Amino acid sequence: MPQDSAPSLLRDPLPATPDDPSTAAPRQASGEAFGWIDAERAERRRAGLVRTLRPRPAESPLLDLASNDYLGLARHPEVTHGAAEAAYRWGAGATGSRLVTGSTELHARLETELAAFCGFEAALVLSSGYAANLAAVTALTDRSTLIVSDSGNHASLIDGCRLSRARTAVVPHADPEAVRTALTGHDGRALAVTDSVFSVDGDAAPLAALAEVCRAQGAALLVDDAHGLGVLGDGGRGALSAAGLAGDGDVVATVTLSKSLGSQGGAVLGPARVIEHLVNTARSFIFDTGLAPAAAGGALAALRLLRGEPQRATRAGQVAGELHSRLTAAGLAAVRPDAAVVSVRAPSPELAVRWAADCRASGLAVGCFRPPSVPDGISRLRLTARADLTDTQIDTAVGTIVATAPGL
């Protein structure tokens, strides 16, 4: 039948009936469902805790001491070329979860070389360091497990503990004896979780002592080495390598590819049986799209660059020590760094924000940590001791921070 002689079901619809919802007057949306947000926003403003997004240009005139690019590799030509080449060859995205279409030969190569570099039997790459911590904590525990968590741990470890539904004992910061006390008397599986280097003050966990306590109590040890990889250990192999714990059968590490390796993503490192268990049980791995090939290619290029230039790790530590010594000599309360994070305490959240803004106005980008991001309620400037900073840039950074410091 010709189209123009077909029944006019689409061209001439029947008159709408009064009960037809399509004819009803549009309902007025009420903002009362989210009215509580206004009160919370006002409270944040009163407390000086408002956060805003600040998109940066591709080429910034600011001296950067705010990012986590510890080794200065995010813009290194070999790293950006590795990312671009991977995107060109493998596509812009992973196209699916790792268990469907999201695993490529590139991901497997990165896992093999990352595990070997850090001294572990196997590795599993995920889309972020956050996802890696969620995967490790939730897959290695159940409701009967006791988790012992350092009070200074990163939010991703804290969220992993919550999602695991295991009983969690939060213990005082960097206190192996408190971990021993928490584990004593527990009959069953147990897992101690800690950062290797704490992101707020830049202090290192006593990993050797923690491992000793865990072994005496039959517990496993999970260490987030996000801020140790590329900075600590021989040639930047990480805090577990430095502590002589890399590759041990009762130790698991997580790392991020977005700090020293200048890319994006995360990984879990450990015994092969642990990695195989995560592949089969970790929800943030199974149900998440795989890491984009460009990020995997960039991370692999950065890893190879670090392997060939181990002095980058040494330089990051030297810069951190120089920043600390010069800022404390000027009368500021800077915490002695164990890796590449230098923390400088501020009198209040409001003054911390103003201090950071004054630094920015003077050409220096610094981090600003305030509650609830800091567990002890003390606001800080957070400085990144990058390996590629020159002596002149260190002079500029120190001079700017001191000149803009409130109360000096």
Image (spheres, grey):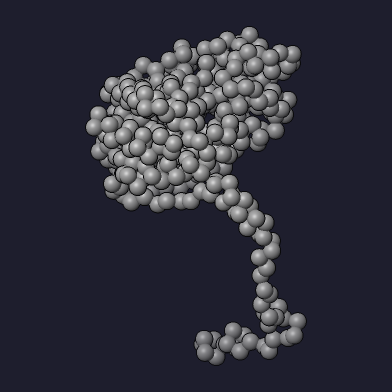
The residue that appears at 36% across and 16% down in the rendered structure is 234
Rendered position, 155 above or below 234:
below
Quarter of the image where one finds residue 407: top left
Residue depicted at 54% across the width and 18% down the height: 251
Question: With 23 as the anchor, is 233 left or right in this view?
Answer: left
Q: Residue at x 43, y 27 (%)?
A: 334
Q: In this orientation, does residue 50 appear?
A: yes
Residue 333: x %, y % from top left: 45, 27
Residue nearest the observer in this picture, 272 or 115 = 115
Q: Position of residue 168 (x, y in %)?
A: 68, 27
In the picture, which quadrant includes the N terminus? bottom right
Where on the picture, by quarter, is residue 291?
Answer: top left
Q: Quadrant of the C terminus?
A: top left
Does any portion of residue 282 appear in the rendered image?
no
Count of numbered circles on the image: 0
Return the x and y of residue 203 as percentages of the image width and height. Answer: 48, 23
Residue 281 lies left or right of residue 349; in this view the side is right
Place of residue 165 in the rendered image (x, y in percent of width and height, measured from the top left): 70, 33
Q: Is residue 182 left or right of residue 45?
A: right
Q: In front: 330, or 369?
A: 330
- Could you say which quadrant of the image residue 276 lies in? top right
Residue at image position (43%, 16%) is 241
